[in-house]
């Protein structure tokens, strides 16, 4: 009896996640309610709260169901030593694009994530969770890029943090554009060429740490100008540019 009850609860949970995909995709996350999800799943609102604390928790579980396999692969790659780190990144990127191209559930969830998740106050926890997840993803990619530097696949002064952001933006952009218009191109067929172009650019002209230092100096200068009295903005800029002037 206990096992049947547990199995029934698991089935209900999956039904709710399926319903959330449909409702969020149709109405947008901000425009959807848990009552609507419950009605779509054919269960009571109380059943929703049995499995999920609130809409943010339901949204997170829906996303996790679609993205967890790739996140697990990426986390594993970041904690493993690779003979060819850039080839590992290529395989991960191809796996991500192939999954999106062939998995209807992934397509639905990414459509919700990219195009139906409005930035309103009631979904603020969703946005915050997204930032944390993105930070974890960037950290994993940066660790593999650091291995590429160690293997001399990239120059020693490569700005791995900025490179990770560039790679993430490139792949996310491909996903975003394809989900928006799947008829525009064959994602699975085009994926190898798209990823190879990205990695070729990284090898040929990676972002360098020196450029990061220039950006940091510019940020310091901007901060100094914002906090200086109006008549002293020029002097503050000079002090930020020339540390000796502070003495």
Image (spheres, rainbow, N blue to C red):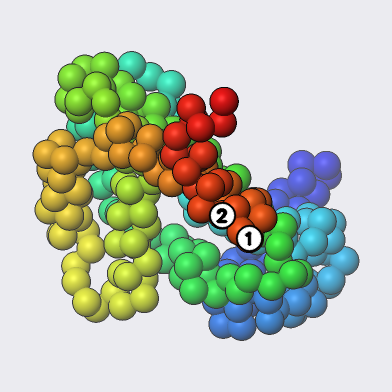
Quarter that holds the N terminus: top right
Mark 2: secondary structure: helix
Horizontal side of residue 195 vs 223, given as left or right: left
Above-or-below relation of 148 to 9:
above
Q: Nearer the viewer, residue 164 or 43?
A: 164
Residue 134 can be seen in this image? no
Q: Nearer the viewer, residue 154 or 114?
A: 154
From the top left corner, tell me how far across and down residue 44 is, in percent: 83, 72
Above-or-below relation of 247 to 172:
above
10 Å neighbourhood of mark 2: few (<14), some, or many (≥20)?
some
Mark 1: secondary structure: helix
Residue 118 can be seen in this image? yes
10 Å neighbourhood of mark 1: few (<14), some, or many (≥20)?
few
Residue 158 placement: quadrant: top left
Residue 205 placement: quadrant: top left
Q: Residue at x 61, y 59 (%)?
A: 231
Q: Residue furthest right?
A: 46
Above-or-below relation of 161 to 128:
above
Quarter that holds the C terminus: top right
Mark linked to residue 129: none
From the top left corner, tell me how far across and down residue 230 is, in percent: 63, 60
Q: Nearer the viewer, residue 40 or 70?
A: 70
The number of discs equals: 2
Residue 159 placement: quadrant: top left
Q: Mark 1 and mark 2 in contact? Answer it, CB < 8 Å.
A: yes
From the top left corner, tell me how far across and down residue 223 is, in percent: 57, 48
Pointer 2: what residue?
A: 233
From the top left corner, tell me how far across and down residue 168 is, in percent: 37, 49
Pointer 1: what residue?
A: 230
Q: Residue at x 36, y 54 (%)?
A: 169
Q: Residue at x 44, y 39 (%)?
A: 241
User: CA gap, disc 1 to disc 2?
Assistant: 6 Å
């Amino acid at each position: 009896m206990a096992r049947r009850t547990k199995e029934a609860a698991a089935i209900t949970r999956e039904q709710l996640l399926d319903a959330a995909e449909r409702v969020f995709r149709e109405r947008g996350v901000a425009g959807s309610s848990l009552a609507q999800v419950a009605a779509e799943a054919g269960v009571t609102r109380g059943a929703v709260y049995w499995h999920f604390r609130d809409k943010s928790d339901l949204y997170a579980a829906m996303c996790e169901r679609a993205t967890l396999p790739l996140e697990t692969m990426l986390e594993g790659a970041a904690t493993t030593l690779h003979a060819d780190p850039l080839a590992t990144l290529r395989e991960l990127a191809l796996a991500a694009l192939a999954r999106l191209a062939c998995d209807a559930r992934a397509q639905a969830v990414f459509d919700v994530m990219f195009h139906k998740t409005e930035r309103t106050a009631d979904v603020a926890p969703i946005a915050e969770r997204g930032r944390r997840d993105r930070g974890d993803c960037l950290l994993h990619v940066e660790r593999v890029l650091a291995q590429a530097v160690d293997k001399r696949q990239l120059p020693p002064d490569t700005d791995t943090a900025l490179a990770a952001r560039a790679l993430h933006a490139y792949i996310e952009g491909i996903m975003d554009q394809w989900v928006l218009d799947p008829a525009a191109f064959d994602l699975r067929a085009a994926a190898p060429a798209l990823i190879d172009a990205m990695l070729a650019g990284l090898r040929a002209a990676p972002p360098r740490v020196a450029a990061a230092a220039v950006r940091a100096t510019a940020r310091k200068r901007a901060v100094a100008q914002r906090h200086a009295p109006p008549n002293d903005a020029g002097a503050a800029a000079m002090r930020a540019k020339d540390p000796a002037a502070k003495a």
